[in-house]
Image (cartoon, helix red, strand yellow):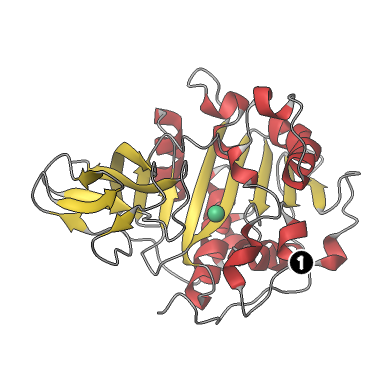
């Protein structure tokens, strides 16, 4: 579908504004039994509405953990509230990208922005979580991806969740660390594990189904929910997964960065050395045969990631 067809629009989530944690738009449901603290986050990017649909549905359906506790956080609600169907991409954030600020240096530092204020408010919730699923969507119509990070624990959990069919192991962005890489999530020695799911194109109905299915299967995988309750609400069967390891993230260095084709993502470029873009005075070429292009950006901003290169694992 075209990037500008708006099948899936923002919904009213103001009934979750008060929450029950003292942090706006953060709700925790306790099972009363021992178990992990599981965090589901939506709207880390304000224009990525599928996660808001999924969390709203789960809360509305009265989801109840059988073990541990379950927290729902609508992250960048300030940006979400600015959604304008005539300029839908502009509500990604207000001042800066909320998913590039997740390090103690930045969070404890002097910089101020509306996103940093929100990240500082959410930090104790993120730090307390044993498992995190951060729900996103993409600019293009490329297939859904699970981003599992570089550690084996992320890969294991992605396999246990079982959807979506493509799993990408990557290190994130030069522009700043993501929520899913924060603290213990990025430490192989810690059992705390985070996943980030890219559910498909931002405003596609399919993204909503992927978001909900992934959230339900995630809750089953971390054993905090009655599987029968979850399975009854799934829309699709799981199919075998393929794993891709990201080898390079191409960061934009020139305002003249230009792709040579309108890549959507997940294209496989057969020959090493194929030039796919130019970035000011130099070409960007694939480093090996059968190179997978992951999440090519449509926002050509110096310092941001243009595309990532990856290879399928056996
Ligand atoms: Zn996102």
Q: Which x, y percent locates residue 295? A: 38, 55
- Which residue is outermost to the top? 189
Binning the other alpha carbons within 10 Å of mark 1 as few (below 14), some (14 to 19) or many (20 upward) gives some
Q: Quadrant of residue 254?
A: top left
- Of residues 181 and 210, the one nearer the viewer is 181
Q: In this orientation, does residue 224 appear?
A: no
Q: Quadrant of residue 42?
A: bottom right
- Of residues 221 and 18, the one nearer the viewer is 18
Q: Is residue 247 above or below residue 266?
A: above
- Of residues 2 and 227, the one nearer the viewer is 2
For label 1, the SS is loop
Whether label 1 lies within 8 Å of ligand 1 gets the answer: no
Position of residue 47 in the picture relative to residue 155 (left or right): right
Q: Which x, y percent locates residue 202? A: 52, 68
Q: Which x, y percent locates residue 30? A: 81, 44
Position of residue 249 in the picture relative to residue 66 (left or right): left
Position of residue 309 in the picture relative to residue 73 (left or right): left
The quadrant where ligand 1 appears is bottom right
Q: Quadrant of residue 191?
A: top right
Which quadrant of the rendered structure holds the C terminus? top left
Q: Which x, y percent locates residue 76? A: 72, 54
Q: In this orientation, does residue 164 appear?
A: yes
Q: Is residue 297 above or below residue 281?
A: below
Report the label total. Answer: 1
Name the residue carrying label 1: 81
Q: Residue at x 72, y 60 (%)?
A: 79
Q: Residue at x 46, y 45 (%)?
A: 302
Which quadrant of the rendered structure holds the N terminus? bottom left
């Amino acid at each position: 579908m075209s990037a500008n067809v708006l099948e899936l629009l923002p919904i009213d989530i103001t009934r979750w504004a008060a929450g029950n944690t003292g942090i706006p738009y953060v709700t925790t449901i306790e099972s009363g039994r021992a178990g992990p603290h599981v965090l589901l986050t939506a709207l880390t990017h304000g224009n990525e509405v599928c996660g808001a649909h999924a969390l709203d549905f789960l809360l509305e359906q009265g989801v109840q953990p059988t073990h541990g506790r379950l927290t729902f956080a609508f992250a960048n609600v300030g940006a979400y509230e600015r959604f304008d169907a005539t300029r839908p991409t502009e509500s990604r954030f207000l001042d800066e990208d909320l998913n590039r600020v997740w390090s103690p240096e930045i969070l404890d530092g002097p910089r101020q922005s509306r996103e940093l204020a929100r990240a500082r408010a959410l930090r104790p919730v993120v730090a307390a979580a044993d498992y995190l699923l951060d729900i996103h969507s993409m600019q293009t119509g490329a297939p859904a991806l699970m981003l599992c990070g570089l550690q084996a624990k992320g890969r294991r959990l992605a396999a246990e969740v079982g959807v979506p069919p493509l799993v990408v192991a990557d290190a994130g962005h030069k522009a700043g660390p993501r929520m899913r890489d924060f603290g213990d999530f990025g430490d192989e020695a810690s059992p705390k594990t985070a996943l980030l799911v890219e559910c498909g194109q931002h405003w596609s109905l399919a993204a909503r189904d992927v978001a909900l299915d992934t959230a339900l299967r995630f809750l089953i995988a971390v054993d905090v929910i009655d599987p029968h309750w979850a399975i009854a609400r799934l829309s699709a069967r799981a199919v075998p997964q393929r794993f891709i390891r990201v080898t390079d993230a191409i960061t934009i260095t020139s305002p003249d960065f230009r792709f040579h084709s309108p890549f959507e993502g997940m294209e496989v470029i057969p020959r090493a050395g194929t030039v796919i873009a130019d970035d000011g005075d130099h070409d960007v070429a694939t480093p090996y045969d059968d190179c997978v292009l992951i999440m090519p950006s449509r926002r050509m901003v110096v310092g941001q990631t243009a595309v990532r290169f990856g290879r399928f694992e056996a």
